[in-house]
Image: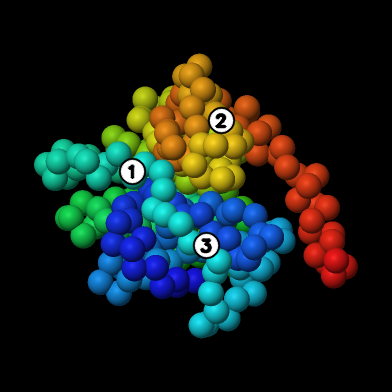
Amino acid sequence: MEVEAPRVARAALPGQFVIVRADEPGERIPLTIADYDAAKGSVVIVTQTIGVSTRKINALEPGDTLLDFAGPLGRPSDFVTETQGGLCAKRILFVAGGVGAAPVYPQVKWLHERGVEADVIIGAKNREMLIMTDEMQSVARNLYLATDDGSAGFRGLVTELMKELIDNRGQRYDEVITVGPMIMMKFVALTTKAYGVKTIASLNSLMVDGTGMCGACRVSIGGRTLFTCVDGPEFDAHLVDFDEAMRRQGMYKTQEERALHKCKIGL
C-alpha cells in the first residue's frame, strides 16, 4: 500500500517504522517501512491480513485515508552511519522470512544506491507466499529463494540454504541481517553464531505503542532490559533472548482472538 505521507517520506531511513491506525477504536499497528520516496512524498507499507486491525487496513481502497500514520520511529539501521569504504569492504547477507521481505527491501535498495551490493535470501512456505521478489532482484547482488515445499528455489529452511551457500558454494559473509518470524530469526542467529558471523535481528513484531510507554516490547539483550521501539528495532541477534521474546509476543493472543471473533460476527 502506497501512502501519501510527505513528512515521513522525507525523514525516513532504512530500518525505521511507522505506527498506523485505521480508525478511532483501532489498535496501533507498528509496520516497518517497506519503501519511501522523498520526492514523491510517499511511503510503502506491507500488511498481512491476520487480525481485526489488519483487516481494516487492507479493506481500504485507493483514495481512502488512515487515521494515524506516525513516524518515522525507531533507530535506523546501523549501516547508514558507516563510511562508504567500510560498507564496500563488507559482504552482507540479508535473510528475510515471509513479510519480512518488505522491510529488507529498503535496506538493500539504500545500499545498492551507494554502490554496495548485498546478497538476499527470501524464505516462505510456498511460491504463493513469496513477496517483493522482482523488486529485490533489481537491487540485490544475488537473490536466493527458499520454500518449505520446494515450489520455488531451494527446498528447505533459510538456515539450510545459508549453510549450503557457505559450505558448498564458496560464499563468505561478514554480516547477516535478518527480519521475519521470531523463530526463524532465532535459528538464523544460532546458525551464524557457529560461523562467527555478526548478525542483526529486527524485533519490530514485538511493538505495540511504539513510544516506550506501554512496556510491551521489553526484550532482554545480553541480560539487559531494553525497549524494542526506542532502543531498536534492530539488535545484536546473538544477544537477544528469543525465547522470552516469543513468550512476550503471545501476551495478547486471547484478546486478539476475541476481537477477531466479534469482527466476524459483526459486533
Q: Kindly identify which residue carries mark 2.
A: 218
Q: In the current view of this chain or complex, which residue is farthest to the top? A: 223
Q: Residue at x 45, y 26 (%)?
A: 238
Q: Which residue is mark 3?
A: 68
**In the image, what residue type sits under mark 1?**
Ser
Where is residue 259? Give x, y as percent.
79, 56
- Disc 1 element: loop
Which residue occupies the extreme front position in the image? 24
Name the image colouring: rainbow
Question: Badge 1, how many Cα within 10 Å: few under 14, some, many 20+?
Answer: some
Q: Is residue 170 above or below residue 57?
A: above
Spatial CA distance of label 3 from label 2 is: 24 Å
Tell me residue 260's x, y (percent).
79, 59
Whole-percent x, y for residue 15 in the image: 38, 48
Reading the chain from its start, which is encountered first: label 2 or label 1?
1
Between 149 and 95, the one lying in front of the other is 95
Give the residue type at disc 2.
Arg
| SS at circle 2 | strand
Give above or below for 60 relative to 249. below
How many neighbours does mark 3 have within 10 angstroms: few (below 14), some (14-19), or many (20 or more)? Answer: some
Q: Pinpoint residue 49: horizontal percent, then vertical percent.
A: 66, 63
Question: Which residue is found at the position 60% from the left and 76% from the top?
Answer: 60
Q: Residue furthest left?
A: 85
255 vs 61: above or below: above
The residue mark sitting in front, 2 or 1, is 2
Whether residues under marks 3 and 2 lie with C-beta atoms below 8 angstroms apart, the answer is no
Residue placed under numbered mark 1 in the picture: 77
Q: Earlier in the sequence, mark 3 or mark 1?
A: 3
Q: Label 2 vs label 1: CA separation?
A: 19 Å
Q: Quadrant of the C terminus?
A: bottom right
Q: Nearer the viewer, residue 210 or 188?
A: 210
Q: Is residue 91 left or right of residue 60?
A: left
